[in-house]
Image: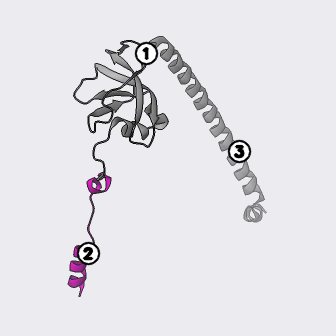
Amino acid sequence: MEKAKKLLYERKIRTYSLDCITRNKKYWHKNLVEMLIIFPNKGIGLEVKQKKNEWKSFYRIKDVKSSDGRRGLVKAVLYKNTTPVTGRYESIRGIFKRGIWDCRIPQPINVSVNHNSFQIDKLQQLIQEKELFLKERQQKLKQIIENQNNQNQNRDPHNLEEQK
């Protein structure tokens, strides 16, 4: 009987792998509008390029207008070697082609090291102050607990009988 149950279970219930569950069967490749809409704020600020190109030439998304989630208009600024080519918005061509787009979160540009080190020093100082505060608080709590234990021992009826 157990053997029959096991065989029936193996035939009727299929085990799914993570790949089977996460695979998108309807649209394997997405066009640019479909890809950008799933991001917060419709992907504004993301860097986008065609997969055949390198990251030396990319678009930084500035505006996405979508009518139904598949079709729309995407305006961006063209960058080459992290500098804008014209500085004005332009429509990206070929946004409806599927599977040729790649995107990434933009890298911070012109980060001053001195400003960050100042913030790190300030944070380290705040951490040290917090550690001192916690140590003092822990010592005070220990003292309070010891005082309460001493008072409880003095009030304990067994101790009173022993002292008499």
Give the quarter of the figure containing the C terminus: bottom right
Say whether residue 11 is magenta. Answer: yes
Q: Earlier in the sequence, mark 3 or mark 2?
A: 2
Q: Which residues are magenta?
A: 1-23
Residue under label 2: 12
Front residue (pair 61, 89) = 89
Dot 3 lies on which element? helix
Name the residue: 77% across, 62% down.
160
Dot 1 lies on which element? loop
Front residue (pair 151, 98) = 98
Q: Earlier in the sequence, mark 1 or mark 2?
A: 2
| Residue found at the far bottom of this picture | 1
Is the Cβ of the residue at disc 3 closer than 8 Å to that at disc 2? no
Residue 88 image label:
1
Q: Position of residue 75 (x, y in %)?
A: 42, 25
Name the residue: 49% across, 17% down.
116
Residue type, numbered disc 1: Arg
